[in-house]
Image (cartoon, coloured by chain):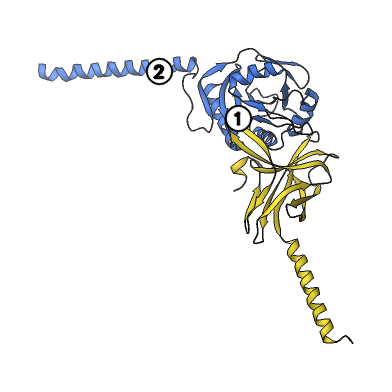
Amino acid sequence: MQTKSKPKYTNVILIIVAVLSLGLGYWFSQQFHLQGRDGSIPQGLEATVLDQARPLKPFILMDDNGEAFTEQTLKGQWDFLFFGYVHCPDVCPIALKVMQDAWKQMPHDPADPAAPRMIFVSVDPDRDTPELLQQYVRFFDPSFIGVTGKADEIDKLTGQLGILYGFEDKDADGNYNVNHSAQFILIDPQGRMRAVISPPHDPATIASNFQTIRNYYGD
Amino acid sequence: MLLPRRVWQPLLALCLLTSFAIVQADEMLDIDNAWVAEAPPVAPVMAGYMEIENETDKLIRITGVSCPDFEKVEIHEMSMSGGMMKMRQIEKLDVPPHGKVALQPGGYHLMLFNPKQPLKKGDTLMVTLHTATGYSQTVKMEIKERPSGDMHHQHQ
């Protein structure tokens, strides 16, 4: 009798363990979901996603309508940032064209809360006035936003995003080049740095990676 | 008709040689895919791209570029250095004998400064390349919309 009842106990224990495991697993997955997915990253992307989104320290810039543009302005929707200057013949218009093409492949109805904003930050405020910036970025799309400001405020933003830039000497005509990073920075709706997208840029890849990141972390 | 053979034969030869020389001079450089990227009307600079092929046995050194529609034109090179995109002016661009140099997005490009009037897609520009030997060749460049994507995606 004893030898026959032993397996029965084992079965009962196994069932209890299995049920507990299922319950615990479900509980853990719920906790995980509730806390968001900070601490992990979606796979298979051509973007560098930060496993812990990085909140931005304060800065005060100006948008192309002359309104203040701060770390608070970046809250409420996803934002793509690119840093450059209007006197840039090659890299910046290429990047803005990529933004334009990627944006067309994303939700972009301004009424749609899923629509990200495309923001071009000029690191050359001496030449790029808000008026010039506005006319420049709106050529690519009327919804695109130009931002600039005082050099030390620009540095507060570029410094924490890992964006580098530097001015070359002026030529005889007073023209000068600005060397700068060519990454797109993706900011989440909580106004935190979430991803870095390095060149070469492919609009379709950027659009699909953005969708993956958004689905993974939520809005 | 009444000219003796010893007169018209050398004349004919001279004519043939001259026309041959002109044809030769015209075809020192074979330029393809010459275009200027459309830019916002307020843009103070535009970028031009082309493929330049040297059809001669000698190196051709391009030392200047001009276009009547712009204040000045320079050759620039874009490169990635220290995490930044750097642009620098190239004083001379060498096209090797029977070789090719491509000016393309993210690499060498013409930098056209301050258009004299706003230019738009479909407009054409006459751009002249000047070489170290005093030779010059003019190419027609059309203003076109930039293709999608950047850098290596564009020259596949």
Residue A188 seen in the current view: no
**In front: mark 1 or mark 2?**
1
Is disc 1 placed on a helix, strand or loop?
loop
Q: Amino acid at mark 1?
A: Gln
Badge number at residue A26? 2
**Which colour is chain A painted?**
blue
Q: Earlier in the sequence, mark 1 or mark 2?
A: 2
Please state the total of marks drawn on the protein image.
2
Looking at this view, is A66 or A211 the one in front?
A66
Badge number at residue B77? none
Which chain did the image draw in yellow?
B
Badge number at residue A183? 1
Image quadrant assignment for residue A74: top right
Q: Amino acid at mark 2?
A: Tyr
Looking at this view, is A112 or A216 the one in front?
A216
Host chain of mark 2: A
